[in-house]
Image: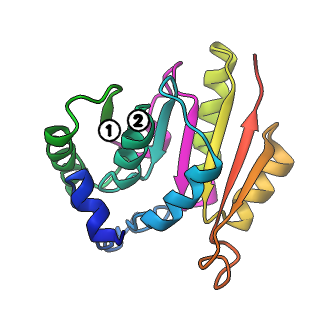
Amino acid sequence: MNERAFDQLLNIKTEGSGKGFGKALHYHRYEPTPYAALELLFREYELKSSDHVVDFGCGKGRSNFYIHYLSNATVKGVEMNEAIYQEATQNRDRYWKKARSRKGQIQFYCCLAEEYKIDPSDNRFYFFNPFSIEIFMKVINNILQSVEKARRDIELIIYYCSDEYLFFLENQTAFELKKEVILPGFNDRNPSERFLIYRLDNK
């Protein structure tokens, strides 16, 4: 299915990209993960209904709704742009009209990523190149502090991972690369078009 067909299946509107955020230089413009890339990811990576997924820089919520539709996991989206956040909540209302029988929850938060308070149940974190390495480091440190208080296994799902993200995770954290999901047709054009799964075992 194409992008529009998937949106229609989920009863949401997530096409298009966002404009820049003016002075918010550390935050990148909204751009949804292609549905074709999400399909390839979840052929090789499993989420359980017991997982709690946080999508940083969730935009209009495409990844959130796709993940919930696929796995019934609880999903949370963190978005700093209030106008886009409002579109995400409107999408949630539309989505539930077709997905009332599904379990799990979908929540959205309008705040800076580094200000989101990590819940002890949050155990999967999704990033699609949402912000600078400075913000990424703050968010990862927030996750690590949460794990110190409530020990659990953590996984990061990173799409279009920058070299700065990679260097930080590999050299300054205990996260280890669990899986690399190559995207045929995407990766041929740009080697950054891939998913990297990093895991932190803490049980």
**Percent coordinates x, y for residue 101 in the rendering:** 23, 28
| Residue placed most toward the observer, 34 or 134 | 34
Q: Which residues are magenta?
A: 110-134
Question: In this rendering, does residue 131 appear at all?
Answer: no
Q: Residue at x 58, y 29 (%)?
A: 123
Residue 153 figure quarter:
top right
Specify which label sits upstream in the sequence, 2 or 1: 2
Percent position of residue 100, x then y: 19, 31
Give the position of the C terminus as an image quadrant.
Answer: top right
* Three-letter amino acid code at the position of disc 2: Val
Please give left or right for residue 126 compared with residue 73 in the image: right
The answer to whether residue 80 of the structure is visible from this angle is yes
- Is 118 colored magenta in this rendering? yes
Is residue 72 toward the left or the right of residue 118 in the image? Answer: left
User: Closer to us: mark 2 or mark 1?
Assistant: 2
Disc 2: which residue: 75
Q: Residue 90 lies in magenta, yes or no?
A: no
Q: Mark 1 highlights which residue?
A: 109
Residue 99 disc label? none
Q: Is residue 63 left or right of residue 51?
A: left
Q: CA distance from mark 2 to mark 1?
A: 11 Å
Neighbor class of circle 2 (other Cα within 10 Å; few <14, some 14-19, many 20+) is many
Q: Residue at x 27, y 66 (%)?
A: 5
Q: Residue 65 in the image: x percent, y percent?
A: 34, 46
- Looking at the rendered structure, the secondary structure element under dot 2 is strand
Furthest residue toward right: 171
Kind of residue indicated by mark 1? Tyr
Q: Position of residue 53 (x, y in %)?
A: 49, 35
Q: Quadrant of the N terminus?
A: bottom left
